[in-house]
Image (cartoon, helix red, strand yellow):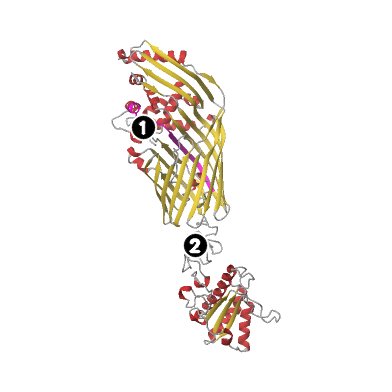
Amino acid sequence: MKEIIIYITISILILSNKISAQTNLNLYNFRNVGQSNLLNPSIRPLANFTFGLPSAYVSGQMPEMTLANFFNKEENADSTFRRIVKDPNLSFNNLGISTVIDPVFIGFAIKKNYFSLGVQFNYDFMGSPPKDILGLMQGTTFFQNLLNRQADLGNVDINSSAWLGYHVGYTREITNKLSIGVRVKYLQGILNVNTEQSTLKLASNEDSLYIKAGFKVSIAGIEDLMKNDFNLKQTIFSGIGRSGKADSTFNEMDYLYEFLLKRENVSGSGWGIDFGANYKFNQHVSVSASLIDLGYINWDKNYRNYNLDTKEFNYKGVDLKDLNQFDSLEKRFTELQDSIITKVFVPTETTNAYTTNLNAKLYLGAQYALNYNNMFDFVFFNNFGSKKFNPALSLSFTKKVWSILDLRISGAYYNNNFTNAGVGFSLNLGPFQTYLFSDNLIATIQYDEAKFINIRAGVNWNIGRNNDRDGDGIPNIKDKCWKDYGSVALNGCSDMDNDGVPDNEDNCIDIPGNPCTNGCPDKDNDCVADINDSCVNDSGNVNLNGCPGATIDTMEIELPIEERKILNDAINNLEFEEGKPVIKATSLVSLEELAKLLNAKPSYNLIINSYNENEENDKKHLKLIQKRALALIKFLAKKDVSKDRITAYAFEIKKPIADNKTGEVKNKSIEIKIVK
């Protein structure tokens, strides 16, 4: 039984020799790939429908070792073992390994809701196995190397699990700025090794061997694996060193995954849940957070518990210096092994179901979008499966190249190392999409610096783009600024200074202004920008550079009856959409007749007076009537009436236009007069 536990532990280490725990920093908030929703269920991908073909992710970390420690052209498996065991600077502390295979992923949007579902195979390992445990696989070579020294293999803290998960996720846009998400997972446990405590010390000199051992280990699904003729030893030895047989390794690994994915090998079940939230401050800045893989698996099938109270064994009678012949050495150590296992170190075997937790992960993200095509992302990550606080920080830049390529480059700090350069991209050829992400691409080039490495790759079939590409709640077909986050009131355009003038029409984008001056400051509200206003403190005439002109009443023309009727009809029929500076269609006929009159009489000019008829002199309402006057000017200008013939005034104090008792002219917020 001890051999089985050791082999499984070693195999975990060996399977990581070509990868260097699960970070996924580059994929986080990469909305063009649907699987980014798996890292934060509140982040809604761009595609309306995604069908993910099989994809894979492998990841690992070794904070105190690098990939170079495993690769040497001059070494084989045995010499690699010996070197790692002897080197006091090498350690497997806080080793983390993760493999995720997605046979299927489906995501689709319905209005402000996004749904996802899929299946995942997960293999997860976190622990700090002592490096001397490698020596146990060397047989006699190990004991020869142990001569006159001791090996401490105690405190083997390992939690290794493989499981199959079925997940359903939901994302909801609560407001134009806030979205939240949740994902629920049903888990089927396949195999597990969990050490609650362990002690193993070995020491020797020329004539004795000392062993102190004790452990409490729970396993599930392991015995079924060993019964299926799986040549674990071959996988282990062929997987290490350049001299290993790669073809044999791959064949054994294929067999291993085929075994793990068989439904009849289920050894437990449990539940998991993911949470996420995303908040947009404006069209440029957003923040997000997610806590994923919160959950547990209850191992209640194919399980065993092994408990060995700590015991000591001191063996004398073998002169290790004289054991030079392999046959004699092998025979004596076989006798010694049988004696130790059958008489001294006999664990108590029980069958008690037990529970293990998933390795929860935290992501905190912040995004700054220069525009739709250029974005910066900052991501903080921590894996709670490790008992040591070992966060990762990443800064990345994403560039959209036309509509076919999204490219991301990043730099990351992880495992006390800044030299981690990552890359990610999605290539979009119509509905077909392929993608690849790595947080530490340098690991494939420079082994000496690689303390972690990961890679995720896959293929998707996307149908339909998000009809709100900038995420401001306005469909692209109605969004006048579909590349920038904006407001509903401004038809999807942004307004950085909050003056009611969209940035694409605002001549003073950083300073609040007046709508009738294209967003520039207008202190006296006379529709003349302060920079052009010769009388900035006095409301005046547009044609007089903002200074007061002659009294309006003395300039008014006494019109013939027919022309007066045209003017009155235009005034009486002038109506706007509720709360908007939009002229109603029912008013257009009368205004067109007025435009014909002005075009027929070149000497006629027009005065437009805007009054704030709100009793509280609300500034917001004043801006509305100013916009309405501007809308009227624009309409007449489209009918060939020169703007130079139109003068506009704005009055903050409520001023009735006519006596309501007469019924001749209704009290309106806009007054129109024809003058010379």
Q: Is residue 524 left or right of residue 454?
A: right
The residue type indicated by label 2 comes to: Met
Residue at figure coordinates x 41%, y 36% from the top left: 61
Q: Earlier in the sequence, mark 2 or mark 1?
A: 1
Q: Is residue 441 above or below residue 208?
A: below
- Chain part drawn in magenta: 83-107
**Amino acid type indicated by mark 1:** Ala
Other residues around mark 2 within 10 Å, as few (<14) / some (14–19) / many (≥20)? some
Judged from the image, the secondary structure of the residue bearing numbered disc 2 is loop
Q: Is residue 406 visible?
A: no
Determine if the magenta segment contains residue 288: no
Q: Secondary structure at mark 1?
A: helix
Q: Quadrant of the C terminus?
A: bottom right
Q: Is residue 40 left or right of residue 621?
A: left
Q: What residue occupies the far left of the structure in this picture?
A: 74
Name the disc covering residue 246, or none.
1
Q: Which residue is mark 2?
A: 496
Residue 564 screen position, x and y as percent: 62, 86
Instruction: Report the residue at 36% width, 29% height from top.
Output: 238
Is 421 rendered above or below residue 555?
Answer: above
Distance from label 2 to label 1 (Cα)?
A: 60 Å
Q: Position of residue 22 (x, y in %)?
A: 45, 39
The front one of 578 and 56 is: 578
The answer to whether residue 644 shows anywhere in this view is yes
